[in-house]
Image: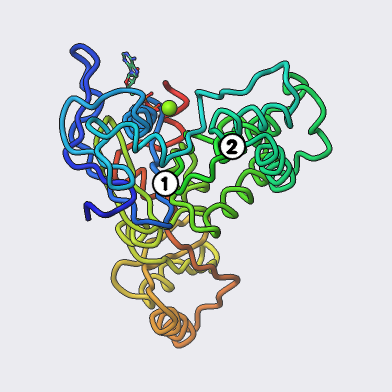
């Protein structure tokens, strides 16, 4: 476990009397992506800042790339790329100049800096804008330039702190493609997000965090399985719901107004049995659907509130 790319055990952090992290345990294996999913104020940025050595933990063990963030900060900093709220983009340099400057900061030669800048501009679809100053970039372009800048030194581990918050849908999709590309190239990624859909789509594993504590961890499917099985819903019309519910058996849930009956049904076998029972009872099914629980259901069940509603309140 301690060989993992990112490892925290009992990580705590307070600001004055405010306990922000209350014993956070995380493991991110090399070459995988973990989404740290939680509402505003959950402690995500604080974790990223500790992992990237910008602030020190109060307690617990924290290792990045096998190095201790407190005792071996320099080694950690050499291992990571960081992007998010600390954008180091210079507004008055062009996209290309920003990337070349970053290369020089990482002690690449002038020629290597130029080569790397060109590669990144292409990879991040910024070639058309490469000679414009960053100030003129759209929000989505800026985020991509910011991410590109953090990748100049090809770090094996990167932190993405809410990389798509506030982006329009098209820019978000572009950013997702870029992130998936990094993931395919074998980069270890810790990504924080408030968006369930983003965690679901991108990450290998998801840690759900609320009020400074990890309240659940697993693959998207594992988390969804905690909520319950898939549900089969049939539309039969108001007049037939009772008969349908009786046929489908124990646990059937009736929505009279909608004229629907639903029941937990895992797999084809249970679905087939329910439909056969309806047929045998002579109930006409107008339409049917199978719902997987969503991460929204997961968040609601675990925290008692919805992720994005909680985010809006903060
Ligand atoms: N420098 C700071 N001083 C005092 N409180 C802070 C500081 N940074 C963060 N906090 C508080 O810590 C909590 C967690 O913040 P943060 O880690 O930024 O959450 P998230 O990134 O999940 O939105 C919040 O209540 C926030 O107000
Ligand atoms: Mg944050």
Q: Quadrant of the C terminus?
A: top left
Find disc 1 in the rendering and name its residue.
35
Q: Nearer the viewer, residue 169 or 125?
A: 125
Find disc 2 in the rendering and name its residue.
108
Q: Quadrant of the N terminus?
A: bottom left
Q: Nearer the viewer, mark 1 or mark 2?
A: 2
Q: Residue at x 41, y 79 (%)?
A: 274
Dots 1, 2 in contact, CB < 8 A = no
Ligand 2 position by quadrant: top left
x, y percent for residue 182: 56, 52
Q: In the picture provided, is 161 more to the left or to the right than 265? A: right
x, y percent for residue 137: 75, 26
Q: Residue at x 77, y 22 (%)?
A: 133
Q: Residue at x 37, y 50 (%)?
A: 206
Label 2 crowding class (10 Å Cα cut-off): few <14, some 14-19, many 20+? some
Q: Residue at x 52, y 55 (%)?
A: 183
Q: Quadrant of residue 115?
A: top right
Q: Nearer the viewer, residue 228 or 15?
A: 15
Q: Quadrant of residue 107?
A: top right
Q: Nearer the viewer, residue 104 or 281?
A: 104
Q: Quadrant of residue 72?
A: top left
Q: How many marks on residues?
A: 2
x, y percent for residue 165: 56, 32
Does the beta carbon at disc 2 come under 8 Å from ligand 2? no
**Above or below — where is 17 with respect to 55?**
above
**Above or below — where is 66 with respect to 256?**
above
- Residue at mark 1 to residue at mark 2: CA–CA distance: 31 Å
Colour scheme of the rendered structure: rainbow
What element does badge 1 sit on? strand
**Above or below — where is 97 with respect to 123?**
above
x, y percent for residue 127: 80, 40
């Amino acid at each position: 476990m301690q060989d993992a790319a990112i490892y925290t055990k009992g990580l705590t952090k307070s600001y004055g009397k405010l306990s922000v992290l209350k014993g956070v345990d995380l493991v991110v294996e090399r070459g995988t992506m973990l989404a740290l999913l939680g509402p505003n104020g959950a402690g995500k940025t604080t974790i990223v800042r500790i992992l990237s050595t910008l602030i020190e933990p109060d307690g617990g063990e924290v290792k990045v790339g096998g190095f201790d963030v407190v005792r071996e900060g320099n080694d950690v900093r050499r291992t990571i790329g960081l992007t998010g709220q600390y954008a180091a983009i210079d507004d008055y340099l062009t996209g290309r100049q920003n990337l070349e400057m970053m290369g020089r900061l990482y002690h690449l030669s002038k020629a290597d800096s130029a080569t790397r800048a060109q590669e990144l501009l292409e990879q991040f679809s910024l070639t058309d804008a490469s000679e414009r100053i960053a100030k003129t970039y759209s929000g989505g372009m800026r985020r991509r330039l910011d991410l590109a800048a953090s990748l100049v030194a090809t770090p094996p581990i990167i932190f993405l702190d809410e990389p798509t918050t506030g982006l329009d849908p098209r820019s978000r999709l572009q950013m997702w493609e870029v992130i998936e590309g990094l993931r395919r190239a074998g980069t270890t990624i810790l990504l924080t997000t408030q968006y369930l859909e983003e965690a679901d789509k991108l990450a290998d594993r998801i840690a759900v965090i609320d009020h400074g504590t990890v309240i659940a961890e697993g693959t998207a499917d594992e988390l969804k399985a905690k909520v319950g099985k898939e549900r089969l819903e049939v539309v039969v019309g108001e007049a037939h719901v009772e008969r349908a519910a009786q046929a489908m058996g124990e646990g059937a849930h009736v929505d009279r107004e909608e004229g629907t009956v639903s029941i937990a049904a895992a797999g084809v076998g249970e679905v087939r049995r329910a439909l056969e029972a309806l047929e045998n009872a002579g109930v006409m099914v107008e339409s049917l659907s199978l719902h997987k629980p969503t991460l929204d259901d997961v968040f609601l069940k675990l925290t008692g509130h919805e992720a994005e509603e909680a985010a809006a309140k903060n």
